[in-house]
Image (cartoon, rainbow, N blue to C red):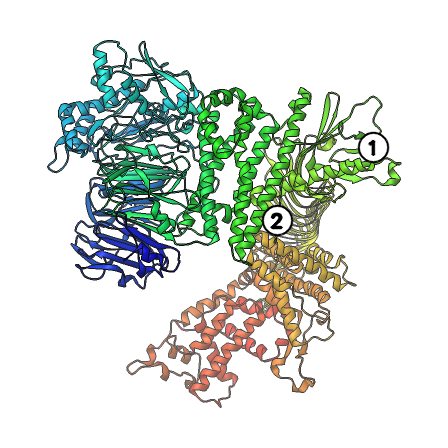
Amino acid sequence: MDNSNEGENEDSSSHLLYTWQGGNIEFYPTLHSKQVAKVSFGSEHTAILTRNHELYVEGGNLYGQLGTGSAGGAAKTPILVEKLKDALVIDVACGSNHTAAILDDGTVCCWGDGSHGQCGNSFAETVTEPTPVALEEQGASCEHGVTGQGRILSAFQISCGDIHTMAISTDYELWTWGSGVQLGLGNLKETCKPMKVEFLCGKKVLSVSCGASHTVTLVERSNRKSSDNLKLKVHNDKPSTCALCNKEVYSCKEEQDMCIISDEHKCPLGLELRDDQSKSDDNLSGDDNPESQSKFGGISLKQSKTSIFNAKEAKEFLSKRLSDGENETPRSGLGELGSNIGAFLSNVPFRSVTDRVVANVQTTIDKFRFVSAENVPEIESMTESFSDNSISDSGSEKLTYKSHDESLETVAALVDSSNKIDIIDAKTESNICDNSNTQPLQSPQEQNVVVKDSKAQDTLEDKTKQGNEKVSNDVIKDVKSNFTIGVDGDESSSDEDDGKEEEISTQTAPIRKGANTMETSFSSDNLKDMLPDHFKAGSHANSKRFSVHRVHSLGALVDPRYSLTLFNKQGSKMPACRVSLDTEVWSWGTNKSGQLGVGDMLERIQPSCVNYLSNRRVVKIICGANHSLALTSTGQVFSWGSNKQGQLGQSNNTVAPSKIKLISSQFIWDVATGRNHTLLVADMGPQPEIYYCGKQQTGSPIKSGMTCQPIRLTDFRRKAGWIRQAFAGGDRCGCIVDKTIDSLSATLYEVAASERNFHYQLSLMTAGICKPILLSEAFIGMESTTYGMSMKILLESFINLTTNIGINSVELTRTIQGLESMENISMLGSHEEFLSLFEHYSKSFCDSLAVCGFDNISKITIPLFEKSQEVIKELSEMTKVEVATDATKMLCRLLQIPLQRLGTYSRLTTKLTNALPENSELKTIYEGVSRMWDEIKGDIKDDRTMADSTRKFWDSCSPKLMDVLKLPNRRLIRDSRSHSLSLLNAGRFSSHWFLLFNDAFVHAQYASHQNFPLATVWTETVKESESSGLYQFRLVTPEETLTLNAPSASEKAEWVLKINQAILAVIMEKKSLRSQTKMDTRGSRVSMYQGSLRKQSSSSLFTLPISRQACHVFYRIPELKGGKYEGMWSLGKPHGQGEMTFLDGSVYSGKFKLGQFNGQGKLTVPKANGAFEIHEGLWKEGMKQGLGKVSYENGDIYEGYCKGNLRHGHGVFKQGQIKSSQATIYIGEWVNDKRCGYGVMDDVMDGEKYMGMWQDDVKHGKGIIVTLDGIYYEGNFNYGKMTGVGLMIMNDDTCYEGDFYDKNQPYGKGTLTMPNGDSILGQFSGKLIHGLKVNGTFRKRGHFSTVVEKRTSFHSSNNAFKSFGKFSVAPDNKWEDIFRYCRTLLFSTPDVSTVDVKKAWEVIAIRISAGKKSASQERRPSAGDSLDILESIPPYNTGNLTVQRYRAIKTYLSKAFDTHYHPLGHLMEGLVDVYRATYVGVGANARLLSHAVGEVKSFVARIYDIIRKLFPDLPQESSPVQIFGELPNDKDSVDEEEEEVISASGLLHPILLPRVYPVLFTLYALHCEQEDDKYTERMTRWNRQADIALMSYLGMDEKFWLLDEYTSGHERFSTIRDKCFLDPIEKLQQISTTFCPSDKLDVIRRAFNGINKAVQTGVGKGHMWSMDDLFPVFQYVVIRARIQHLGAEICFIQDLMEHHLEFGELGIMFTTLKACYFQIQHEKING
């Protein structure tokens, strides 16, 4: 390495590394071309991480800590770690003799000394190369003991101690391995396998730092999950007890009628076995903390109504803890401060130490009788730190007791200057300690604080023995020196500066003992958030005072803190994490020098919270060998631990955090610690300076061997350059610097320093002004007032702003250090949110100003400012704010400090922008940000002016009007007394006063007024022809129209302009919150405030949007009075989407048009019984019109079409519960709210279904009834009764044809035909269930053979009855309403004889467009894709239909019928629904098959008629037509592939039949049930035979057996089964998976082709078939195919196949299949 002089000759570069040991600054020439990101020092080695993720090492290698693959030797210059050269290293740390690194994939690698397990995996003496260490998380176990699969975690931060290593996983959990109590694993002191620190599970660990034998970590404050390490002793006759403290573990609480038993428990001393972390109160208003828990070191106070403290157990436990250790005396556990400690302990009995600690805790608990959530803050307020060690200037050591955490009551005393502070003499305190039952001597009303060091204690004891003699001035000085209050944003301090007492305030309070008094100084800027909850709430403040006793606790205090942060930024990917100021510091390990900062010197085997730092906004923690430091966001550093070499930066040892003092203008922003020294980086002008304290090495410019106060290294900046980061370790120091910097970097340094200064100013105000005001009892009583609420919002906004400025400050620092990019800085990367902070604060400030908030709280600010003169003076000097004698004015000036910052932000942003490269994207963005700061500044200035004028207006306004109109956010814009405006045609003696506010237009007259919200005000200019020469304009409101007259044209224009500007501001405010600032391409934004319109010229009359969103409560229109509408408006009428709530509770939500329901909407009407009637669907002119749904109060539901609020058109009406015995479902046509036309009703109660005509809500006309008993009725109905000639068919085929009086009641002439063909002709009477009376002639069957013949054919057996179908509704007359609606929708008329095809396609385009929008809102991407296809319309009227065009039409129709938004798709859905409703359930009757088939054919014909209108190129007739391709001109030359036979069935069957197939085929299966049963029986029996036996039986020629290819060498022919003709069998089985006759015929054809192919393969390709040869083979295939319901399949094909296919090849194949089916039914087979 070369010295600094040589380094100066190198080329300028950034991120250079300089190191020194003593005063010789060294530069690494070998790394000159490398930019360094981090450096870590061990005892004898150094690790250097570059910005391109390479790792270099140098130094000693005795234990292999350089990772070279061998141990021994050394590297004098940095060398690359070869094993990691192909990896990307993101973090590195050095222990004393080992090294750890993290790779970009989160893998942890360790190497070096592993004798204590610190390198992981094993306890090897040396690990010579990087070795992966897995953070393996075990899988969770279920209640049955089954463990799930574990996982390997990634890490993003690493830290090393002497013999232990810590890592933070990407889940923000802490992992550890190595040896010692610093692991934090409780009683486990050694592990080479990484283990999670379970105590911190549930907390987000942000960073960790390891000392030699202790660990400190920074975590986000949050509730931690309870650990599950409670160990119990189970007893048979009593509750379980704690294994450590032997206390019974159970608790009981009552909740209503339930008793809850819990086993949550805390051991009173020692390890926390189960921890429910106290919840911080983040509510600034001071709500009571729901749960709290105070921990005094190992002593934990449980939240219960009785004390759990056991003095005897506590003493035993503490004695054991103090005496633990290897070959150590009991007193050695307190620390290692030399012989003075031993001498002190020799004079203090060991028992006295434990007794004193335990007795003071006991006293605290006895004072309050019990420990609960309410009293924990009060208990905490009575405690002080246990002890402190002090080093005198001469170097002699002595043990003293001194307070470092000032009493919380002392902070309260700053608010109430009358508080008294009493000193309790040592003798009295000793008496209290010796007797745990002794009550406090002071009354609750007295305010007592104990502040003693050892000198004061001894003196007071002597003086007490002599009586009430005066305390010496020396004692007073010692007491005062230990009670000085400092400021760290929200904190207090007790340090001295240069040996002098630091007094910030002149306010004093007496400290007295009896008649003797003495004074001490208090600072007025003490933090109010150190107050416990009972001070925050105000209900207990100043009402009950408690004496504050010193308690020698084993831990620090727990204080509730505020946490107000706007940006909730989520943790980013490793290695960096987002800034959080709501942090806690936790520490554990060896504590002999107080390096844990918990107020004592007892070691901790698991994490303990350093409560003193809980509200300090710590952003960085760092550990030396035996000391620790914490850096706060306000640029202050707290140190604690060993101070033998002055490394704490102060003259005293301290076991609790104490602030390091620098001059007031400097703010520290980086810290580093070595073994016995400390580095501080602080602002000092434009370029940062570095400070040093601690042990000095040889060659140091400091002559003495140590320095207690930080000294500035004056030569470093000159030699090195601009400091980015500081590092230290062992005896070495290091810095990453930029030799020279560009203008961008220099500006970043300037912005960061400025922001730190600004954050400190805000923190000072927050602590000294804002929080004391908020927490004062007087202010709490004002919160219900207008001005009180506005001031509360302002002060809370100020605190919120302070927090976010702190975040921005830390982000700027991290950017300078190279840990973040500029885009991650809040003021740049999140500039919209950052701007909104200031806009919100500005609005709060102006609101308070407008309502005279500052004047009204003067009684609070005056006494506060009297006590806070030093704070005000410091703020005045820092901000150049002139000090005012008037407290109100001074508060106003101080709270304007954030607003004065806007110009600075604009200047700094502009400076940053100018430093960026030209034409860069960031430059464009930041230019826009800079303009936004300027605009915001102008807006705030305008709003401030308006707020001030509004305040003056309220002062002059009548109290009555002011009480009604005065609101914090209301601003006066114009009034008619200053600018004349009158009401047209007003009375001569009437008084009209018009006031224009930023949110309302007010018309005041005498004692009344009308308030018109601007959101529902429209301006209209009156035409000259109507104005009669006057300068008139109108204001239109929802219920009134005001015609106003101005004295001149200019006044009129000015009034209209101001009103329109105010309306526009209101509209924009509703459209866009300021947190969503809108920016255009140039970076300008649209402001929601009034000031955004200041640039409008007074002569520019602009047009406001007619439509807007607003809310209005009706007060005048009778039918709407009391109702509330919220939604879109147009010219004073509800128009668009909105919601109307009526006075009777009815609510309509949906579309409006000019004040009436119009479009899709929902009306909910409450009924008397608490139920609701709900109307959903389409509305027109206030009434239901179109498709909708009505849910009645009794549970009935109607879904269908309406007209004029009546059911009209096709609809479904469901009565009763569907599964109940009284439910009915009607689906059909309605006219004027009555069933009329064709419809189907399913009556569950009667077990029947009616399908026929209706009139006046009753059955009337032709109809069919089928019942659950299988009875079929068909006839004419007359007003509900079946009368006249009809037909009745029983389930057993008994049939009656003749006259009926009603169903089940034949009456008159008729014929009764028996199932066997016998019949009776004559006169019938009576009911079927009671018996029929017959007078007629009996005939024996004569034509039975004809019936049998017809039934055995594949036609319906119903044809045997002459009257069947005669009295049913014709298929073409069914569901006509559905078709009528579709035709009307497409062609605007139900008559399609003459239609405009072009308009029909326009309607379709509109429907598809609306459907796409709806699908997008419903997040249905698949529907959107289909609609995209439908947007392309195929050629529909070319005059020439070709194959290609036909296929395009077919594809389009397939998509159209599949889409609900297309009219054809809607038609198909309706038809399928009614078809299923008709023929399922009771309708699944074989008698209905012919009706079902007829409906299908009718559907096809009527749908084709509609399609034909859309595509005129299609054939007009539904009969088959042959078409050809486009290319050939000669039909004779057309290839077979280019011609096609088309028909209506061929086009629509593939679309319709798959949707209705399940229902239709069920009817076919019922119809062919008997035949299929016979077929199935024979097929089953034949399939039991082997192939050769079956083929032989069927008479198949042996040459077609083809058995040779299926037999192996030893297999017999007789054993072969189901192997012949497999291909055709499988193809024929597919007939059950198709839905169209054409597809089923194609299956049959492919099966025949398969047979032919198989035979030609075995016999020869030239084989010619004869029917005699083919039939047995095909019959074999049919039998082996085992097709279920083959008869139903055949009937389905025969009924629906196109007739032109019957006589071709397919017809012959189908006939063969029918013949096989018939043959199988009637073939006889032997057993």
Q: Position of residue 723 (x, y in %)?
A: 38, 49
- Residue placed at 52% from the left, 27% from the top? 883
Residue 1084 marker:
2
- Residue placed at 48% from the left, 25% from the top? 773
Q: Residues within 10 Å of mark 2 (few under 14, many from 20)?
A: some
Q: Is residue 962 above or below residue 13?
A: above
Q: Position of residue 260 (x, y in %)?
A: 34, 29
Extreme residue toward the bottom, this view: 1662
- 956 relative to 1692 in the view: left or right: right
Give, as a three-letter code, the residue at label 2: Ser
| Quarter assignment of residue 1205 | top right
Q: Position of residue 1338 (x, y in %)?
A: 63, 58
Q: CA distance from mark 1 to mark 2?
A: 38 Å
Q: Nearer the viewer, residue 687 or 850?
A: 687
Residue 1047 marker:
1
Q: Nearer the viewer, residue 1596 or 293?
A: 293
**Can you see residue 1314?**
no
Q: Nearer the viewer, residue 935 or 1319?
A: 935
Quadrant the C terminus occupies = bottom left
